[in-house]
Image (cartoon, rainbow, N blue to C red):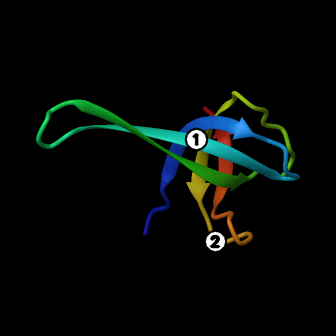
């Protein structure tokens, strides 16, 4: 099964080797035909602590690293 890759913006880098990434998705509402924006935050593993708040990054699904981390940073988008 292929791993999911998402693109988002770093919103927090306060934890050691962890960043919080805000991923926004847009879709058309089935009834109203209006574009709806939904967002979700993911915690991702950043081994070198090189990403800072505001950076655009790509994250990839991985095996659980901790209680909340299931994603790892692939590269800067």
Query: In the image, what residue occupies the spot 68% across and 63% down?
Result: 69
- Crowding around mark 2 (Cα neighbors within 10 Å: few <14, some 14 to 19, many 20+) is few
Query: In the image, what residue occupies the spot 56% across and 37% down?
Result: 8
Q: Are marks 1 and 2 in contact (CB under 8 Å)?
A: no
- Crowding around mark 1 (Cα neighbors within 10 Å: few <14, some 14 to 19, many 20+) is some
Give the camera-side residue of 56 and 53: 53
Give the camera-side residue of 9 and 31: 31
Label 2, on which residue? Answer: 63
Residue 21 at x, y = what percent?
63, 43
The reply, left or right, for residue 33 in relation to residue 77 is: left
Query: In the image, what residue occupies the spot 51% across and 50% down?
Result: 5
Residue 31 at x, y = what percent?
11, 41
Q: Earlier in the sequence, mark 1 or mark 2?
A: 1
Residue 34 at x, y = what percent?
21, 30
Label annotation for residue 77: none
Query: In the image, what residue occupies the spot 73% across and 69% down?
Result: 65
Q: Secondary structure at mark 2?
A: loop
Label 1, on which residue? Answer: 22
């Amino acid at each position: 099964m292929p791993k999911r890759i998402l693109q988002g913006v770093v919103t927090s880098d306060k934890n050691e080797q962890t960043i919080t990434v805000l991923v926004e998705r847009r879709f058309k509402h089935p009834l109203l035909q209006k574009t709806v924006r939904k967002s979700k935050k993911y915690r991702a593993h950043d081994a070198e602590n090189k990403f800072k708040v505001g950076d655009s990054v790509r994250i990839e699904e991985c095996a659980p690293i901790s209680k909340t981390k299931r994603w790892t940073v692939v590269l800067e988008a």
